[in-house]
Image (cartoon, rainbow, N blue to C red):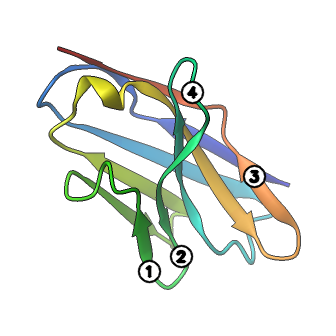
Amino acid sequence: QVQLVESGGGLVQAGGSLRLSCAASGSIFGVDAMGWFRQAPGKQRELVAIITIDGSTNYAESIEGRFTISRDNAKNTVYLQMNSLKPEDTAVYYCVANLPYVGDYWGQGTQVTVSS
């Protein structure tokens, strides 16, 4: 089992910044990709950004250039730096970790609210 604990969500005005963190613990040996998804009210969960163990990244078009994903393998932690936030970025943000041949593990989610 892999446990993921997110932190860093909150309320921010449009144009502001937030930094999300996700710390992994438990059976983390072999975890490859980690990343973030988000789900806004009434919408499906969508990919925000993913980073592999070797640092390769993939971003959703809607946030590219504004958000940056990074990872500290020594701390088993993934970060999402969110700049130039927009009201449409309001959502619950979920951390995910992939363990090859086992599956995906999800955090409980952290609320991000961007006011206009």
Which residue in the structure is indicated by mark 1? 56
Q: Locate the C terminus by quadrant.
A: top left
Number of marks: 4
The numbered mark, 4 or 2, whose residue comes first in the sequence reads 4
Residue matched to label 3:
105
Percent position (x, y) of residue 41? 53, 18
In the rendered structure, find residue 43 and report the number of the disc placed on it.
4
Which numbered mark, 4 or 3, is in the foreground of this view? Answer: 4
Mark 1 or mark 3, earlier in chain: 1
Q: Quarter holding the N terminus?
A: bottom right
In this rendering, the answer to whether 101 lies above or below 75 is below
**Mark 2–mark 3 distance (CA, rounded to whole Å):** 15 Å
| CA distance for labels 4 and 3 | 21 Å
Question: How many angstroms separate mark 1 from mark 3 (CA)?
Answer: 19 Å
Residue shown at the point (39%, 33%) measured from the top left: 8
Mark 2–mark 3 CB contact (< 8 Å)? no
The kind of secondary structure element at disc 2 is: loop
